[in-house]
Each structure stands twice: as structure tokens, then as C-alpha cells.
Image (cartoon, grey):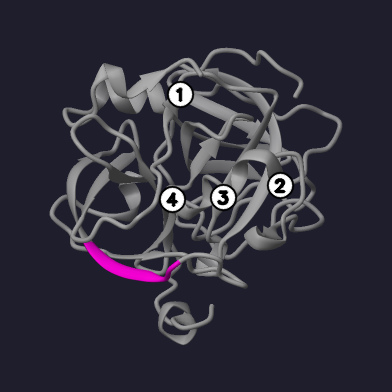
Amino acid sequence: MARHPTDSRMTLWGSLLAGTVLLGLTACGGRSERTEPSVCEPPSRPEVRAFEQCGPTLDFTPINSYVGEFSDVIQDREDAVVLIDGRCTGTLIQASAGPVVLTAGHCVRLGDVPLIVFNFEDDEDGDPLITAGTVIEHSVEPDFALIELDVLPDVTPILLTTLATEQLAIVQHPRGYPKSIAEGRYLDSCNQLIFYGDLDTLVGSSGAGVLNRQGHLVGVHTDGDCEVSGRGANRGWTAESIVEASSYLQGEDIAER
């Protein structure tokens, strides 16, 4: 499981993709109140949820307008984040057997050939690419899937890590909209899950990578338990649990960094 913190620290495809946004299997995150949310509960399978807002405001920043705490690393990482079939998010990750897109298992099924879109963002700053991929690995617990791409773009894959930090970020496609980022607090890690608060997500965010302060992927966002009041916490499966369960990913694909 992720270790405890060590520092304090649509456009060309708009109408096409917006039309494919579904009521997905996902969770939503929110702005926490002073009372800490309950964490480290036994894992539960994702539920079908409506377009809920968690917390009093939605604190998403379009990726190319972002100037927050992760500014020093995020622009080197965000090109690896993709929109999957207009309804989930994924991340191109580095693996010894070859780069693959990592997402939530409840977003796809084994053998599916989803549509993968890179650089779907406001004021896009990279080469647009729409390609397909094949789901080569799928799991319910942990909730993850790996997608092998038909065309591999000129993008640097993100590294996997076991190391959580006090602040976390998720680059995502909430509701299938252009890429944005939200930040929040690391809360705890147990039962192969990582919990985080004050970190907004919505339908469409499922499968997004949870990034530590160094911009490495420590988990995959899959589910949450939150309210408009701000109570509750989001969660995902740790990268470590995914590597352990995967036959494609190997031990050398993840490290404390």
C-alpha cells in the first residue's frame, strides 16, 4: 500500500465526445469540512451515480490555466492523460513490457476496443490524437484495466510509485469535459486503497491517476463517498495493489519515488 507522506508539501471533437458521455460507474469528490471523513472502510464495488456535485463548489482548473502547487511538474505529466470513450479517464503509464493506458476496471471490459483521445483540452498545447486500443487486462478487485494502444503517441508515460505525499492531484476529464486538474489532501491508505479529501471528481473522472507531489502515479481513482455538504472522502486503488494483481505489470515498474 502507499506509504505515508514524506513532504509537506472540447474543440475539434467537442460535439462528438460530449454526446457519448454516459452516466458512468464512478464517484465524486468534494470539499471536506473540519470533521475528518471516515476512511479505511472495506472496499465496495462502484455504484451508478447521478451527476452530483460534492462540496459547496467544484474546484477544477483547466489544465492549461493551472498555476497551483503542482505547476513545476504537471505540464510534463498531463499529456499522458486521456479521455476514454467520452466517459472515463486514463493515464499512459510506463511499463517494462511497453507503455499502456491504465484506467478503472468498471470503465471497460476485457477485449473492448475503446476510443482513446489525447490532448482533449482547452487551449490545447499538444498534438491532437484519436486512436483505439484493446483492453488486454481487466480486474474488479483491484478495480483496474490496461489498454494497449493501436498508435503510441510521442508522449512521456507516467511512472508508478508507492509513495504518497501530503498533497495529491488528479488530472481528469470530469463529465467528459476538457482536461482539468483538482488538488487535495492525502488522508490514509489501507486495504489496498488510498483515500483523499478536498479533491473534487465527477462522473468521467473514474480511472484517472492519483498523482503525488513529484507527479508520479500512486493510485487510480475509482470511487467515493461524499455529499454536497463536503463530508466524505474519495478513494482509489493503490498502484502497488494493481502491480501485484497484474500479469502485465512487473515489480520493477513501480518504486518509492
Q: Residues within 10 Å of mark 3 (few under 14, many from 20)?
A: many
Q: Is residue 43 left or right of residue 172?
A: left
Give, as a three-letter code, the residue at label 2: Gly
The residue where tag 2 is placed is: 30
Residue lying at 59% horizontally and 29% vertically, measured from the top left = 214
The earlier-in-sequence mark between 4 and 2 is 2
The answer, for residue 199, to whether it is visible in the render is no
Q: Which mark is residue 1?
A: none
Q: Which residue is mark 1?
A: 161
Residue position marked by numbered label 4 in the rendering: 80
**Mark 1, secondary structure of its residue:** strand
Q: Amino acid at mark 4?
A: Ala
Nearer the viewer's eye, disc 4 or disc 1?
4
Please tell me which of labels 4 and 3 falls first in the chain. Answer: 4
Mark 1 or mark 2: which is in front?
A: 1
Front residue of 148 and 27: 148
Assess disc 4: are there few (<14), some (14-19) or many (≥20) residues with their C-alpha within 10 Å of its C-alpha: many
- The outermost residue toward the right is 34
As for residue 68 lying within the magenta part, the answer is no
